[in-house]
Image: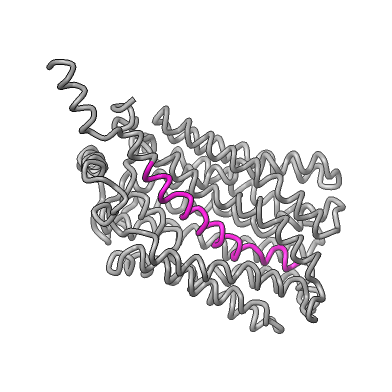
Amino acid sequence: MNSQSIAAKAYAEPSSAATYAKVSLRLLPFLFLCYVCAYLNRINISFAKLTMMDDLAMSDTVYGLGASVFFIGYLMFEVPSNLILLKVGARRWIARIMVTWGIISTAMMFVHTPMQFYVLRFLLGVAEAGFIPAILLYLTYWFPEGRRSKVTAFFLAAIPTAGLIGAPLSGWIMHEFAGVFGWAGWQWLYLWEGVPTFAIGLVAFFYLDDKIEHAKWLTQEQKALISKDLADDAAAKGGHALHSIKDGLTNPRVLLLSFTYFFFTAGLYGVSFWLPTIIKATGVDDPLNLGLLTAIPYGAAVVAMLLVGRSSDSSGERRWHLALAGIIGACALAFSVMFAHNTLIAMIALTIGTMGVMTTISQFWVLPPAVLAGAAAAAGIAMANSIGSISGVVIPYMIGGIQTATGNTGYGVLSLSVCMIIGSLLVFANPAKLVNGRRKASADRSQ
């Protein structure tokens, strides 16, 4: 083949790196923004608690139950939500989820009794059910396995980013708007963080595409390249892939992964709902200062998630990237208890602990799509997230009960450390060939 033919072929065939960069730029920032809004609406209760509970004469136990009841609705509707997505398409369903939870989250500003608090938290869980599995499934439509750790880490970095942005923002809103028009700071918090979610949900309906072939912003050659990479992925799975809804709900491999995730999400929800309270216990009282300090662990976690995701994709190794993050996070959380009354040392430990906790979440979600395909992927991803969500029911209520009974959050934080260790050990119960990924051949091909 002469040099002109080689040049012509290179011009005709799109670059793999350039193609996926185009897909990433189109989808990831918007999905990231969606999840930031989602998580803000899920955890803003942790800041509202600082004054809301006193204003409404509610105990820490009431708060813990209210935080937990969200996950009951979430758990009940998680799998059905993802199966409906297969029928109606990701674009419509993601938009529906965001619009409804934006409305319900805003309505939290009108809570006056524990029962109203419980009901709206339950409805918020129902509304949001299926969002994370929907996005994780949606990403498998656009990215082959060898690129998924970085992509998943970028998307799930929205969790700590929500804390990074939401913590100071929530503290500022409660500090500046308290008493405006006679409303408490926590009421303004629900309003200002609920309405944008509704608006972005409307945008999602027009912005997202359900399938590669619907993407007018890709050339035919780029569509063909992505389709081929995804087909190669499916072929590489061979007989290891699970395809049916029944497999996604009952296969032992899926259940083992699901219970592994349960213990990692225990750390996630413990940190998400109680980090401001833990920091407050070190001697920080002002809501604005609490917000600024709470942002530090979340900012560090974003960096950790992206770096570990890059390393995981480059090496193709998944097991140690996941387990070590859990072990480091557990040890750091336990260390923070030892120095609970020293703000500086406690903050360093909480920062490292949060980095470990958040990294386990992004690294875990690379695993299920490696063994699931088709309807099994929709059902299995939802199942894993549902079982993980059970910890969201148990952990906030448990820590709330411990706080009420002992007046000390330290024992609750230690329980999170134990959960993280158990999750890390369960990683090694998964067969290595199912946990460790394959090198990204499609990416290496073009570089």
Tell me if I can see residue 72 in this picture. Answer: no
Q: Position of residue 238 (x, y in %)?
A: 20, 41
Is 18 placed left or right of 303 in the picture?
left
Question: Nearest the camera: 431 or 48?
Answer: 48
Tell me if I can see residue 19 in this picture. Answer: yes
Is 288 placed left or right of 34 in the picture?
right
Q: Residue furthest front?
A: 4
Residue lying at 62% horizontally and 36% vertically, measured from the top left: 328
Residue lying at 59% horizontally and 78% vertically, measured from the top left: 120
Q: Which residues are magenta?
A: 22-49
Q: Position of residue 419 (x, y in %)?
A: 59, 49
Quadrant the C terminus occupies: top left
Prevailing secondary structure class for the magenta stretch in the rendered image: helix
Q: Residue furthest left?
A: 1
Residue lying at 59% horizontally and 64% vertically, measured from the top left: 42
Is 187 placed left or right of 204 in the picture?
right
| Residue 31 is covered by the magenta coloring | yes
Question: Nearest the camera: 268 or 258?
Answer: 268
Q: Is residue 417 above or below residue 54?
A: above
How many labels, in total?
Answer: 0
Residue lying at 71% horizontally and 61% vertically, measured from the top left: 170
Q: Position of residue 175 (x, y in %)?
A: 81, 64
Q: Would you identify the image quadrant in which residue 121 lies?
A: bottom right
Q: Is residue 68 above or below residue 225?
A: below
Q: Is residue 76 above or below residue 443?
A: below
Question: Nearest the camera: 417 or 181?
Answer: 181
Q: Would you identify the image quadrant in which residue 137 lies?
A: bottom left
Q: Would you identify the image quadrant in which residue 55 lies?
A: bottom right
Quadrant the N terminus occupies: top left
| Residue 307 is covered by the magenta coloring | no
Q: Position of residue 75 (x, y in %)?
A: 47, 67
